[in-house]
Image (spheres, helix red, strand yellow):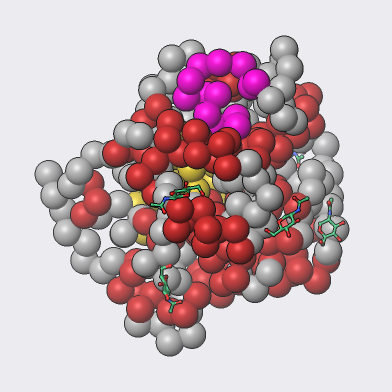
Amino acid sequence: KRRTCPETLSSKIEADSEYKNLFNFSTPVLLRGEHFNNQTWKSLQEYKPPYGWRNLSYSDIRSTLESLNDPANGQLFDRKGKDACISCAVVGNGGILNGSKQGKEIDSHNFVFRVNGAIIKGFEEDVGRKTSFYGFTTNTMKNSLIGYEVWGFTKVPQSEEIQYIFIPSGIRDYVMLRSAIQGIKVPSGHDKGDDTRPWLYFGHNTPSRKFKLLHPSFVRYVKDSFLELLLIGSRFGNGTLRSSATTLKLGSLKCSREVAAYGFITDNYKKFSDHYYEDKKQPLVFYANHDMLLELKLWKSLDTRGIINLYQR
Ligand SMILES: *[C@@H]1O[C@H](CO)[C@@H](O)[C@H](O)[C@H]1NC(C)=O
Ligand SMILES: *[C@@H]1O[C@H](CO)[C@@H](O)[C@H](O)[C@H]1NC(C)=O
Ligand SMILES: *[C@@H]1O[C@H](CO)[C@@H](O)[C@H](O)[C@H]1NC(C)=O
Ligand SMILES: *[C@@H]1O[C@H](CO)[C@@H](O)[C@H](O)[C@H]1NC(C)=O
Ligand SMILES: CC(=O)N[C@H]1CO[C@H](CO)[C@@H](O)[C@@H]1O
């Protein structure tokens, strides 16, 4: 059933004189096979990864894109008609969620986005159960599996409904994605080796329509519009925050009714642990304090202006 939105997020943003320029609803979001041509190849040579394809292998990029040949690879939301009025929860992994009891509310959204070390088992009451999208770079995913294993992040979320959003930080993401679709071990590059079997991460026989690849131009747009904030990061380096912020921005552009952000940094971050799953409080690690505080200001002001709902307590 189609429902029309009383007030769409895009109309709210368009009416906001300060923020409308931060959002560009025409930015391409996902890349798929039909986008590969000489012109795209050439124009993306202008930027190095994650913002383009400079110095990346033509044959790897081409074969990866060609494997994204299902129309669903180019669409975030499969079910037609749902586009009419979609509400999303974007769930970060911040300590603010420990004891929050937000699980039911999170699951009540049409789609739930999670990122990086998203541990669910044992935390359902606070973070919910549903995962519609999992966003990551190969590097942040693997770092999360190593660094958060001790807290229970032993595998990437897998389920019937889940779809995987690859954030292309370098050639390894393209190679991993292609191998995942083909159902083969990673044949070359950084992730080559016996212990890198995509099906361990994304499940066996996962249909190719469940894999999405963010357009490098989208990653660049997020960086530009977020005032270079994304160069900074926490414990596991610069990719972690980028994955969260990129995923949040993606939700803001694509979810027509509402975007609620849970587990992101808030004013009173000192009260909370780095992540919701640590057993003893661990302070949030800043590599670039100033920038992290800018990020905090940005989330908060987007909330104040009614563009996102930022969970705070
Ligand atoms: C928005 O994105 C489109 C597609 O990339 C681009 O052509 C356009 O110039 C952008 N608009 C603004 C105001 O930046
Ligand atoms: C695209 O580039 C390839 C290799 O550079 C070239 O052989 C081919 O003719 C080009 N195709 C078009 C339509 O320009
Ligand atoms: C990377 O690409 C630039 C411009 O496309 C080129 O000048 C440079 O030689 C390349 N570097 C390597 C290591 O291939
Ligand atoms: C999580 O919450 C519980 C119960 O309030 C508390 O005992 C525990 O210390 C908290 N964990 C962290 C890492 O803050
Ligand atoms: C952990 C890490 O790699 N931090 C780096 C993130 O990026 C900034 C700015 O480029 C560096 O100064 C940090 O060392």
| Identity of the residue drawn at 54% across and 66% down | 221
Q: Quarter of the image containing the C terminus?
A: bottom right
- For residue 25, above or below residue 105: below
- Can residue 137 be seen at all in this image of the molecule? no
Q: Quarter of the image containing the N terminus?
A: top left
* 83 sits left or right of 40 in the view: left
Q: Nearer the viewer, residue 69 or 232?
A: 69
**Which quarter of the frame holds ligand 1?**
bottom left
| Identity of the residue drawn at 35% across and 45% down | 34
> Which residue in the rendered view is the most extreme toward the left?
1
Residue 254 in the image, given as x and y percentages of width and height: 37, 56
Q: Nearer the viewer, residue 271 or 127?
A: 127
Residue 71 in the image, given as x and y percentages of width and height: 29, 39
Residue 17 in the image, given as x and y percentages of width and height: 43, 87
Residue 207 in the image, given as x and y percentages of width and height: 38, 23
Q: Nearer the viewer, residue 232 or 154?
A: 232
* 2 sits left or right of 108 in the view: left
| Identity of the residue drawn at 60% across and 52% down | 53
Location of residue 307 by image quarter: bottom left
| Identity of the residue drawn at 83% across and 57% down | 286
Q: Which residues are magenta?
A: 175-187
